[in-house]
Amino acid sequence: MISAPATVPPARRVLAAELPRRIGHQVTVQGWLHRRRTLKSVAFLILRDRSGLAQAVVTGPEAAAVAGGHPEETVLQITGTVTANPRAPGGAELTRPAVSALSGPAAPPPFDLYRPTVPATLPTVLDHAPVALRHPLLRAPHLVSAASVAGFRAALDGLGFTEIHTPKVVASATESGAGVFAIDWFGARAYLAQSPQFFKQTMVGVFERVYEVGPVFRAEPHDTARHLAQYTSLDAELGFVADHREVMAVLREVLAAMTAAVRDRAARACALLNAEVPDVPERIPEIHFTRALELLAARTGEDLRGEQDLAPAHERWLSRWALGEHGSEFLFVTGYPMAKRPFYTHPEPGRPRYSNSFDLLFRGLELVTGGQRLHRHEDYLTTLAARGEPPEPYAGYLDAFRHGMPPHGGFALGLERWTARLTGADNIRRATLFPRDLHRLTP
Amino acid sequence: MISAPATVPPARRVLAAELPRRIGHQVTVQGWLHRRRTLKSVAFLILRDRSGLAQAVVTGPEAAAVAGGHPEETVLQITGTVTANPRAPGGAELTRPAVSALSGPAAPPPFDLYRPTVPATLPTVLDHAPVALRHPLLRAPHLVSAASVAGFRAALDGLGFTEIHTPKVVASATESGAGVFAIDWFGARAYLAQSPQFFKQTMVGVFERVYEVGPVFRAEPHDTARHLAQYTSLDAELGFVADHREVMAVLREVLAAMTAAVRDRAARACALLNAEVPDVPERIPEIHFTRALELLAARTGEDLRGEQDLAPAHERWLSRWALGEHGSEFLFVTGYPMAKRPFYTHPEPGRPRYSNSFDLLFRGLELVTGGQRLHRHEDYLTTLAARGEPPEPYAGYLDAFRHGMPPHGGFALGLERWTARLTGADNIRRATLFPRDLHRLTP
């Protein structure tokens, strides 16, 4: 029934990137046939593995047959002698190769994976993600993403944070204005969690400093280049802060570690994408919301009195301003009006219309939201009452504050948004392996 | 509306564990009032922070008032002189302390958090998780869990794996026999993912070696001490393997790194729990399923001919056998009958009733399932046809195999199960911050 296993004997495998250090030796490489080219009596096979490309040269009468028998994307094992050739990838190639297939002959991919640019539209890429993502340009953002998360964790581990895993299914749909997805939970109604906000706050009472990397779900009915219905949220929360500034200081360390990890672990991917990794200044510039409005009004002539939020155009302008004025691709905007922040936001001492909260702008886009939270039980009750919300749906959450919670704050960073911005992607879906949105549930 | 911010001036905070190195200095500690004791004209305040406990001694006429004004769990800031005292936690205590509250007076917790054992039943603990988990004994398993995940990632990062994030919402409910949760997805029907299996396999085609740490969902209708409806799955998958043995070798490295990280990062938690971290042998012993049945039949007298799986009692017996015979708390059972394994399982060459799969038993319990997968498109079609399943629901997944996939395999390890087993928990819920099951959707 099942085909016999490959009769190819297992061989100690060498990665493509190692070939230049093996000149003169016989080695075995394994990977996907990225590209084949046949001249009169010579065939070039370019193999792709996770480290890069390796070229094998088949000469003599069998050249055409070897190349002809293996369509692109077939998985091959090639054993040959490593020979210097300045025109081959990495300056070395395999000569006198023995070629065998580890997979069946591959069907043609939806578009040529070997071309230097991607000859396909985004919908084609997404429809065929399992194969399309093999294209080095489409694969690269995900290496940047993986490196970024490693940096995020390394920074927080070093600062005494504990990693947590919280429920993605919750009993009430209360945390934010965004839509929620309903679930049938053993016959009861439940919802997909929109964020780990309540959990991470209460866990400050247990671990003081926590972080979580996990999926969050927003039933966003709009179909834009920057919204997903599932994305990966990098969340952190810490106790015993004086105010939101200490949260911003931790975020600065996190960003420095993320960019360092990208430089260190995803250098090839960045080079391929022409992605410039930003410098994180020792001190990220910050501007209060009220001052930002004044600045915008003065420079653009708009009447912005009474504005409660920044429009995307304002964020772009402020980002350019920070770059020009402070040489920084990052800008903290602090003190957003309470009216536009969630109920758990801590007000600004002495100016309670404003908040101890912040957004971090990166290259014109809001990347992180954070701030200090309320920590006294009575403040929660007062705030909910003022907003006309009953406390009952929040019972489990509010209970923690009855039992002693320290001043605390935190932030959330959208991984795909970060990766897209860093790699210059035109759509957040290019930073998501298998996007989920209004129209897309497969593959 | 909102109370004025604490008038306490911010102070450079020292952690409880640092006190012994600060004898003679004036320092400030911050944390929860773990326990207070008042004698005639002296009060002892034991403060708890993430590093441990710190004792402050208030003497004189105000002693009773200070202790009386701050119920247990109130968040305090205490500034005082560090003084050696062999009977205090860590051999040092704070004398002549200035005490101020960072929270309101705490309401009494559902049970005393300062007692050396937990004076509450599991349902009470779970109902009040945000507060109950502050008990050092209830908090400790989660520190072991966090350390374990760090070890998992460290091992795989070192072996060239790429971390991925895959959808938790899928269009068809097909992967396993276990129940699925249905979601209303913008009016369409969708399901919570039971595992990242299909995604991680196809991503071998892109990254060769991938791992994911994320939630999976099983609509398990049974209410046992070892089942959860959401748990954290540690998944890995790698390409270019000769067979399942290479997967087992990677898993061995992963377990070694996990136990090393637990020893390194969660030593205090393990000591508190009396948890013995297992040694991972250079070579974990393994036994073929058929041989395991023979052994079981011979030793227990049962007639096990034709058995397709191991009963829990068999797993416990085999674990004891491995410990006695090989001195190992881990045992690989390989070659499970194909009939009991999922359709993507690779059969055993020459003995197609059996499979290139394995379970890893740890202290009597199945902890990891893994194996080699099919990698040829035609093998998938043949297998599905033989099982009477149409290929259509698997279209996106199967497509990857048409385009060239290498021999590959992987494994999945349930984080909560690992932590529970390692810490000797009587119920997997003790290794889960906020369990979700048949009856529990809150807190």
Image: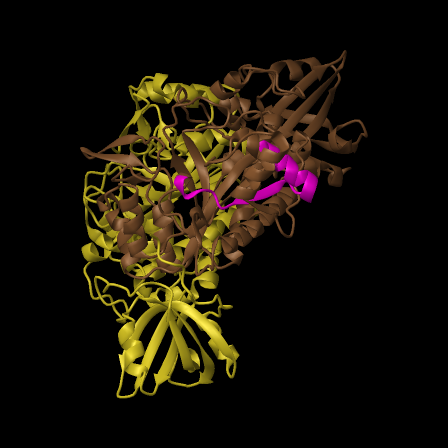
Chain colours: A yellow, B brown
Of residue B376 and residue A290, the one placed in the foreground of this image is B376
- Tag count: 0
A185 or B105, which is in the foreground?
A185
Asked if A242 appears above or below A109 in the picture, the reply is above
Residue A4 painted magenta? no
Closer to the camera in the image, A289 or A303: A289
First to last magenta residue range: B316-339
Relative to A85, is A73 on the left or the right?
A: left
Is A367 placed above or below B109 here? below
Q: Quadrant of residue A111?
A: bottom left
Q: Quadrant of residue B440?
A: top left
Residue B407 percent across, percent down from the top left: 40, 58
Question: Hey, which residue is sitting farthest top in the picture?
Answer: B40
The residue at the point 37 percent across, 51 percent down is: B201
Residue B180, horizontal then vertical, whole percent: 32, 32
Which residue lies at the image location 80% right of the left edge and 29% below the top edge? B85
Q: Is residue A224 visible?
A: yes
On the rendered structure, is A156 left or right of B343? right
> At 24% across and 63% down in the image, what residue appears?
A107
Position of residue B267 in the picture relative to residue A439 (left or right):
right
Q: Relative to A100, is B24 on the left or the right?
A: right
Visible residue check, residue A240: no
Residue B320 lies in magenta, yes or no? yes
Q: Quadrant of residue B326?
A: top right
Look at 25% across and 50% down and name the residue there. B396
Q: Position of residue A56 (x, y in %)?
A: 38, 79
* Residue B142 vertical placement versus A389 (above, below): below
Residue B285 spot, x, y in % from top left:
61, 47
